[in-house]
Image: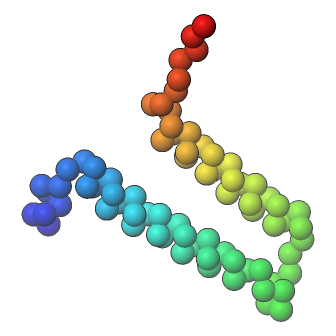
Amino acid sequence: MEQKKNESRHERFKRIASKRTNEILEKIRILGNCSNKSSYEYTEEEVNKIFSEIDKQLKLTKAKFLAGRKERFKL
């Protein structure tokens, strides 16, 4: 625990962001298991709804990271 206490904000970001990213990627992989037609039944509309919501959340989250990088308009 002492090591985490002395880590920089960047090191802490890398540690936590890596862990959370890997968790999300694993959940997406597991979601893919639902595509097995011999075990599940679903419509194209339901699939589109799932991925539309995922895409929406990805865009919102990416926007949070890019918010500080807005370029100013100038002539």
Relative vertical location of residue 72 with respect to residue 33 in this rendering, above or below: above
Give residue 44's position: percent from left, percent from top. Answer: 89, 67
Residue at the spot x=33%, y=57% of the render? 14
In the image, farthest residue toward the top: 75
Give residue 58's position: percent from left, percent from top. Answer: 61, 51
Residue at the spot x=51%, y=37% of the render? 66
Residue at the spot x=86%, y=81% of the render? 41
In the image, farthest residue toward the front: 75
Relative vertical location of residue 38 with respect to residue 74 in this rendering, above or below: below
In the picture provided, is 55 more to the left or to the right than 14?
A: right
Give residue 20's position: percent from left, percent from top. Answer: 43, 63
In the picture provided, is 68 more to the left or to the right than 39?
A: left
Q: Which of the 4 image quadrants contains residue 52?
A: bottom right
Towards the viewer: 66 or 23: 66
Give residue 51's position: percent from left, percent from top. Answer: 74, 60
Relative vertical location of residue 16 with respect to residue 66 in this rendering, above or below: below
Colour basis: rainbow
Q: How many marks?
A: 0
Q: Where the C terminus falls, by quadrant? A: top right
In the image, farthest residue toward the bottom: 38
In the picture provided, is 39 more to the left or to the right than 32?
A: right
Residue at the spot x=67%, y=57% of the render? 54
Towards the viewer: 15 or 53: 15
Q: Where the N terminus falls, by quadrant? A: bottom left
Relative vertical location of residue 59 with respect to residue 36 in this rendering, above or below: above
